[in-house]
Image (cartoon, grey):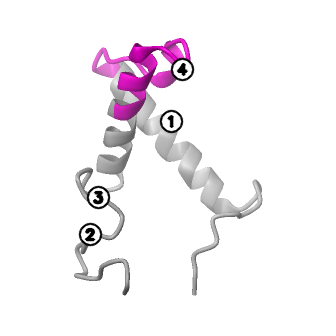
Amino acid sequence: MEDDYTQPPEHPIWDQARALEATVSTIRRAQGKLNPQDCEPGTPAFDRITREFLRDLVRAMDADPHDTPGDAGEFGVGASG
């Protein structure tokens, strides 16, 4: 069974995602860091800040930012299950 990432905007998962994004954004701002919305899209700075933001977002989800799809995660299950 595949995951369905096409939940409608009113689904509670979107509220959780927005709250997590806002939390990471607030923490980064308190640390004096830029967020993607602070940069001009398409610039090297935007790309760098977006990668940093995504790493922080993954850390906030208590995941390993170095895991890649297909890696065996904390449950020891890879891409093939």
Of callouts 2 and 4, the N-terminal one = 4
Residue 22 image label? 1
Reading the image, the residue beneath label 4 is 37
Reading the image, the residue beneath label 2 is 71
Q: Is residue 19 magenta?
A: no
Vertically, is 22 above or below 5?
above
Callout 3 secondary element: loop
Residue extent of the magenta highlight: 30-51
Q: What residue type is labelled 1?
A: Ala
**Is 41 left, or right, of 28 in this rendering?**
right
Q: Position of residue 76 (x, y in %)?
A: 22, 81
Reading the image, the residue beneath label 3 is 63
Of callouts 3 and 2, the N-terminal one = 3
Tell me the CA gap for discs 1 and 3.
18 Å
Q: Position of residue 16 (x, y in %)?
A: 56, 54
Q: Where is residue 5 in the image (x, y as percent from the top left)?
A: 63, 65
Callout 4 secondary element: helix
Tell me the CA gap for discs 4 and 1.
12 Å
Tell me the CA gap for discs 2 and 1.
28 Å
Q: What residue type is labelled 3?
A: Ala
Say which of marks 2 and 4 sits in front. 2
- Mark 3, Cα crowd under 10 Å, few <14 / some 14-19 / many 20+, is some
Query: The N terminus is located in which quarter?
Result: bottom right
Whether tag 1 and tag 3 are in contact, CB under 8 A, the answer is: no
Of callouts 4 and 1, the N-terminal one = 1
